[in-house]
């Protein structure tokens, strides 16, 4: 097929990628945006297959069949709360593919590659391998297959990185030996494992987003080696958007990227999990009933709903939306305060609430919401914990110290829906629960909200 035709198809695909990405900016257009980008990817794949000399179509068909057979059922059956690990896994596969492609290219050339191709091949091998192994460790951690958080001195990773770069320079300088290339792949993989292993708790999403950006960059490098524009553009789009997402998430947690990777945040989590009893703080909690909550809510003027991970676990979003609609009918003003890292993935709460047809105008981002807690009668905290923890403001040795939180404690009263006194993701106690203005309604969030709603309808 005429290369111009293929390039034209690629350009159409790029336009669709960019338009699709742009549509991901808001919940209203995100789903369509996904389809738009997917159509772009379909066009790019078909155009690539139409190129002269792509190779063995039988093998390609087998690869497509295997990938489809694994990809579609797992994407369909994955629970919303498990999406981060799934992203980690799929992202890792991308990095692994890039690393394997660069190895294949290196072998095929048989020690006779021009530098302009050899450098991107080496880059793709190193970054792809780091991304593959790092993503697998991230998956294992989020899936709770391992809770180990060994301390690895920065010098070890630094040394390893220096060796990998040294070997790559040796290969680029002319020592094009296959075993050296394999050593680069293996040591880069080890670096990926060692860099991600010590990172714990709440930093995992930032890690996954960083690795995602890495995969994009390695794919772009592979595109240079293979002289394929589609791979370069798509890889750079992933690299750039992944980098921006990483920065935004780190900002939301008030941490630098370097601090995420080398600071060991969240490593002390399990040791301080649950209410400690020996520090002299009064830890009595006031528990309340659905009937009392119903009365309090219906007499309020302003109610702010603060959803968190527990709402996702309980799948309570529709019941919550019904409760909010009932309150609005009674003249109560209801808004939702959305913390950027509430739940287990970026945009988690927005996705759930959109699914329950909550009007977008009712969703307030953290900064806007925080301005309004002081004049809020009741904050209804539904399965949120870390994102409301005032220790982030006051307790300097807390693992979440410095993370911006929703200032729920500033509202006139707070009702917290959760099942027990268990801690949230960061594994720490939350002083909000012991405050004078706070009452807890224990139970599964969906059942509790349904109880409150039926009590309210009986009023
Ligand atoms: P948390 O994880 O802090 O707390 C969730 C709370 O929900 C728990 O205290 C739990 O208490 C309660 N809960 C669990 N299941 C139910 C249920 N069925 N019914 C009622 N309550 C329930 O959630 P937040 O959303 O406040 O904070 C998110 C945390 O996750 C942050 O630390 C964030 O950094 C981290 N994180 C965020 C990601 C993101 O991108 N959004 C990704 C990965 C981590 P109990 O067991 O007593 O019911």
Image (cartoon, grey):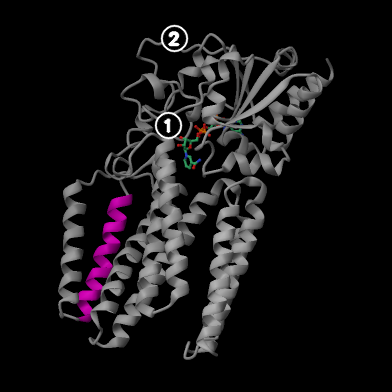
Asked if the residue under mark 1 is in contact with the one under mark 2, i.e. CB atoms within 8 Å, the reply is no
Q: Quick one: 419 or 166, which is closer to the camera?
A: 166
Q: Quick one: 329 or 276, which is closer to the camera?
A: 329
Quadrant in which the C terminus appears: top right
Instruction: Give yes or no for residue 193 being in the magenta stretch.
Output: yes
169 to 114, vertically: above or below: above
Secondary element type, mark 2: loop
**Measuring 67% from the left and 31% from the top, which residue is drawn there?**
362
452 to 319, vertically: above or below: above
CA gap between label 2 and label 1 equals 19 Å
**Measuring 73% from the left and 33% from the top, which residue is drawn there?**
321
**Measuring 35% from the left and 70% from the top, which residue is drawn there?**
221
260 to 308, vertically: above or below: below
Q: Is there any visible trace of residue 294 in the rendered image?
A: yes
Q: Residues within 10 Å of mark 2 (few under 14, many from 20)?
A: few
Q: Earlier in the sequence, mark 2 or mark 1?
A: 2
Residue 320 lies, in percent from the top left, at: 70, 31
Residue bearing mark 2: 282
373 to 221, vertically: above or below: above
Residue bearing mark 1: 427
Question: Bounds of the magenta span?
Answer: 177-196
């Amino acid at each position: 097929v005429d290369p111009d035709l293929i390039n034209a198809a690629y350009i159409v695909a790029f336009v669709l990628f960019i338009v699709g990405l742009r549509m991901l900016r808001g919940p209203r257009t995100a789903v369509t945006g996904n389809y738009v980008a997917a159509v772009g990817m379909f066009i790019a794949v078909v155009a690539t297959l139409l190129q002269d000399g792509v190779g063995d179509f039988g093998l390609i068909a087998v690869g497509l069949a295997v990938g489809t057979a694994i990809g579609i059922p797992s994407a369909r059956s994955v629970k919303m709360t498990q999406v981060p690990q799934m992203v980690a896994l799929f992202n890792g596969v991308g990095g692994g593919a890039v690393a394997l492609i660069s190895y294949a290219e290196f072998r095929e050339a048989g020690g006779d590659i021009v530098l302009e191709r050899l450098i991107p091949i080496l880059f793709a091998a190193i970054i792809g391998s780091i991304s593959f192994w790092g993503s697998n460790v991230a998956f294992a951690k989020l899936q709770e297959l391992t809770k180990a958080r060994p301390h690895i001195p920065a010098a070890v990773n630094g040394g390893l990185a220096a060796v990998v770069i040294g070997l790559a320079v040796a290969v680029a300088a002319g020592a094009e030996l296959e075993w050296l290339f394999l050593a680069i792949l293996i040591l880069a993989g080890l670096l990926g494992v060692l860099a991600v292993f010590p990172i714990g708790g709440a930093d995992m999403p930032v890690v996954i987003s960083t690795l995602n950006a890495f995969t994009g960059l390695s794919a772009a490098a592979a595109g240079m080696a293979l002289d394929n524009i589609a791979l370069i553009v798509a890889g750079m789009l992933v690299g750039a958007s992944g980098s921006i997402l990483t920065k935004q998430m780190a900002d939301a947690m008030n941490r630098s990227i370097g601090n995420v990777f080398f600071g060991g945040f969240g490593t002390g989590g399990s040791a301080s999990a649950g209410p400690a009893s020996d520090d002299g703080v009064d830890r009595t909690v006031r528990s309340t009933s659905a009937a009392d909550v119903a009365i309090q809510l219906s007499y309020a003027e302003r109610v702010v709903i603060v959803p968190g991970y527990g709402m996702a676990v309980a799948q309570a979003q529709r019941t919550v939306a019904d409760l909010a609609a009932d309150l609005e009918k009674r003249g109560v003003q209801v808004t939702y305060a959305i913390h950027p890292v509430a739940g287990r993935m970026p945009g988690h709460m927005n996705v759930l609430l959109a699914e329950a047809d909550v009007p977008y105008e009712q969703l307030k981002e953290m900064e806007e919401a925080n301005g309004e807690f002081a004049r809020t009668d009741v904050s209804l905290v539904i399965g949120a914990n870390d994102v409301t923890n005032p220790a982030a403001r006051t307790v300097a040795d807390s693992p979440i110290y410095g993370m911006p939180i929703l200032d729920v404690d500033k509202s006139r009263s707070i009702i917290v829906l959760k099942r027990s006194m268990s801690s949230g993701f960061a594994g720490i106690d939350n002083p909000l629960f012991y405050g004078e203005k706070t009452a807890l309604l224990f139970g599964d969030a969906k059942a509790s909200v349904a109880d409150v709603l039926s009590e309210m309808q009986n009023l």
